[in-house]
Structure formats: structure tokens, C-alpha cells
Amino acid sequence: MRYQWRLSKNLPNIIQYYSSAQCNPALLRDVWQPVIGLEIHAQISSASKLFSRVSTTYGAPPNTQVGIFESSHPGTLPVLNKRCVEAGIKTALAFGATVNKMSQFDRKHYFYPDLPAGYQITQFYHPLASNGRIEFIVYNPAVHKFPYRHSVELIQLQLEEDSGKSIHDKDNNRVLVDLNRAGQPLMELVFAPGLRNGEEAAAMVKEVALILTRIGTCNSRMHEGSLRVDANISVHKPGEPLGTRTEVKNLNSLRSLVKAIDFEVERQLDILESGGFVTNETRSFDTVTQETKSMRDKEVIQDYRFMPEPNLLPLRLHDSSEPDCLYNGSLDIKEIHALMPELPEATRERLVKDYGITLKNAILLVSDDDLFNFFMTVMSSSKRNSKLVCNLLLTNLLGALNAINVNIKHSPLSASAFGEIVDLQESGRILTNISQKLIYAICIDKDLRTPTQIVHDNNWIQISNEDALEELVERILNDNLQLVQKYKKSKKKKKIVDALMGKIKSATDSRANMKIVNDILIHKLDLQ
């Protein structure tokens, strides 16, 4: 990307040159460094809302999941959902954050039609957890040749309730309000500004989604609004203070996240390089025009009138792993920590170490739970070659499934049948091209026979009998005496060998063991 800053040992000289009159303005952007920080709002996977027993089922008809608390009836009081607190603690532990023994809820006052009470219950001054970190791998084959690691600090994690949803009906000049989402339990994860471009932001959100899904605290379905991202974006020159930032709100897809960040960086650079000033404002992303648009400015600090929530006591936790811990009847951090599953990064490391697969393949497998489970099922039945399994799975099977637009979870080829194909090839009974034919026969042609049955019925067994192959080679040589004569006189013998090998391959419908054939062929040619 043209705005991406490239560190150089000669940076002082470069900056001095760029400031001179001889500098090419088109190169000026190389000294700017984008700085991106993300705030991620994750809906907690809970059957009921944060402060009431009202259902949280996605896709229900508008305003059918609203109780007296969400609609702010006078006298209604919040009752904290224990499941949501547990989810917040698990998430904090997954990011290595410090879970605070005491946290507190506050009221954040602002007026919107989708917020009946006129305030949001959140944790501002005393969040549930703080001081964590996320480590992730940045890898997009279309952009990066090799994956690289990056990390960003998690400043704090807080519990809060979601607001309702405003639907703007421009045709009738009105605003419709759906309060189904009001009171939905949220975790807000506030990350430090440690990202440099849209690809790193997308990679981080992917890892966050993988972690939350793995530990079961959020389903991370961005298209359903379960995971929403706000991006804080600025640019500055290295060594100078951070520039004025803008906030792009409610990005609900990875594509929108990348496009919004890249556009906003370019927009700010255009302003700065033309002598203007970036306005501190909130912006939205238009998926049609692929541009960010101004919503409201932040030059005047909005007074949210934060105050402690008077109807909720401070949330107190304890950790029985600490020697001086006194049990106070609250949630035990140690017990929740004991229930933590293996995290994605640990899974990737285990795949590389225990199965000897490449990091790239480990990234692909861990990025999809169904794909990972398929791989593990195939590898669990016997000591199969992991490299062969990965090649057939990630190239051939996924290619066939993409052709019919089917997810690996609903693959017509089961893990056991796939393993049978792997065994057939690994034992030398079939060749690689036959494996591909089998996969396509079952996935695309809907062949209901087992792989072994298909191989036998189509006579696809590899020919490895040396006597049979020697007889075949002798016949091909007798039918191609001109090539044999050329082989004796030519200096480009490999070209002639390849031509003869092609004829043998064609004569056996690609079923001959070409390694054995090659040895026999060279031996017979040298004897001519």
C-alpha cells in the first residue's frame, strides 16, 4: 500500500530529502505512518439479557423480545445475569487480562429513540478486566507471501447492555425503533492503537472471533451483528505525536473493516498533504460507495454525565488460587480458568509440532472449526501422512466443495471415506490423479459407492507389478523405434524419455507407477 511506512536505516536522510524542494510529492506518503485502534463489541452467548430474563433469540419479529426493564417502565430494577459475568471472566482470561476483584456499573447518559431509559448501563471507571494482550498471525495469500506475527494490548474489557435498533425509513420520512436488541449482553473490548493497516485489523478481528467462538462466549457472527467493530484511525510522521483520529462506527464485516480503514487513511493523507487539518469526528462506512461519511464531530466533548448505577452493587470476585484469598460467596476466577479450552494459537502450535504441518496449513485449519474437526477425525483413525491429508483436504476436497457451494460440515464425502482415499493413495494402490477423481465422483457426481468400490469398478488400481510394466515398456519401445534411435544419438535424452513416458502414461490411463516405469525405461534404453 502506498501509505505504508517502510522503516529504513537512512530514515533521517530520507525525511530531510522529502522536505526539500526536489522531493517528488508522490513519494511523500512513504513517511506517514497510519495508527489504528479497535473497539470490539461482542454479544455474549446467553439465553437471556444482561439485566432481565427476556429472551435473546436472533431474528425474532420486531419488538417481541422486550420486557418491562428494556422498555424502562418506572420502578423496574436490573438483575445481573451470572452467565454473562462468567463469560466476561472467561474472555478476559483468554486474553491474559487481569480480572479485577471489584468492578462497578455506571450509567452513561445520552438520548436516542432506541434507548428508552435515556442512559446505558456500562462499566466505565471500574471495568471487569484490564491489561491484556492478543497475539495473532497476519496472513492473506493475496497480500502477504509469508505469515507474520503481531500483538496488540487489550486496555480493558467491560460488560454493558446493548441499545435497540433505529431503522430509518427515508421514503416515509420516519424512524422505526426495534427494541429486541435493547438489553442484549455485550462485552466491549478496547484495544490499544497498535495496528498499521486494514489487513492487520482484519487479522486481529479474525483471531478475536476465533477465541470467542472457541471459549463459547460469543458466536462471532458479524453478519448478525454479534460482533461489531469501531475503528479509531489517524496518521502521523514517525517521531511526532499521534495525529487527530476519526472513529468509524459499526463495521460488521471484515471486508468493510479493511475498506473503511484503507479509505480513511487515504482521505486523511489527502487532507494533510494539501495543507488541511483532520477533524476529530465520528464517521460511518457506506458499503455502496466504499467511502466513509461524516456522522458527527467530536471537537466538543459530549457530556455523558457518568454516574454509578445506584441499583447494582459493586461486582466482587475472588480467586482461590491466591494464598491469602478469602471466599466470599462470589464467582471463583480459578474455577472458571480450569474450564478454559485450548486456544487457537495453542492449537496451531500443536498442529505444527505434533503433525509436522506447515504454519500456513495450520492457520487454514484452525480458522474453521468444522475444517479442523474434519482433519482431526481423519488423523485420529490411524497414523496417516499429515502432509498428504492436508494436500488432499485443502486443495482437492475444498475445491470440489467450493464448486458445489457446500461447507465442509455438510460434505458429501465423509471423514471416514476421505480417510479411505488417503489410505488407498498412501499404500500405493492409486495415484494422486485418481484420488482427485474419487473426490469429485463422490462430491460432484453424487456417487454413493465407497472409494474402494469405485476404484475396483473403474479399474483404477495402480499398476506396480514390475513384470507387467517391463512388458508394457518393451511394447512401447518397439512401437516407437524412431524415438529409440534418436535417444542413442541425441544429447537431449531427457526430452525423449519424457515423450516415451507420456505414451506409457496414456496407454495405462495414468495408472502406471511412473517411478518404476522410469527406472525400467532408462535401463532398457541404455541397453539398446
Image (tube, rainbow, N blue to C red):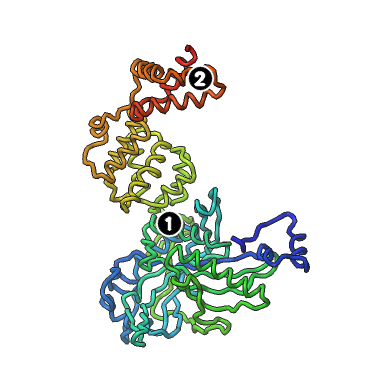
Left or right, 517 with respect to 419, comes to right
Which is more N-terminal, label 2 or label 1? 1
Residue 504 in picture, x, y percent from top left: 38, 25
Of residue 445 and residue 214, the one placed in the foreground of this image is 445
Q: Are marks 1 and 2 in contact (CB under 8 Å)?
A: no
Q: Residue at x 54, y 66 (%)?
A: 262
Q: Residue at x 39, y 74 (%)?
A: 161
In the image, residue 378 above or below residue 43: above
Q: Amino acid at mark 1?
A: Ile
Q: Amino acid at mark 2?
A: Tyr
Residue that badge 2 annotates: 487
Q: Residue furthest front?
A: 482
For label 1, the crowd category at 10 Å Cα-Cα, with few meaning under 14, some 14 to 19 and many 20 or more, is many
For label 2, the crowd category at 10 Å Cα-Cα, with few meaning under 14, some 14 to 19 and many 20 or more, is some
Residue 21 in picture, x, y percent from top left: 78, 69
Residue that badge 1 annotates: 211
Nearer mark to the viewer, of 1 and 2: 2
Q: Which quadrant would residue 419 be assigned to in this image?
A: top left
Q: Residue at x 26, y 44 (%)?
A: 445
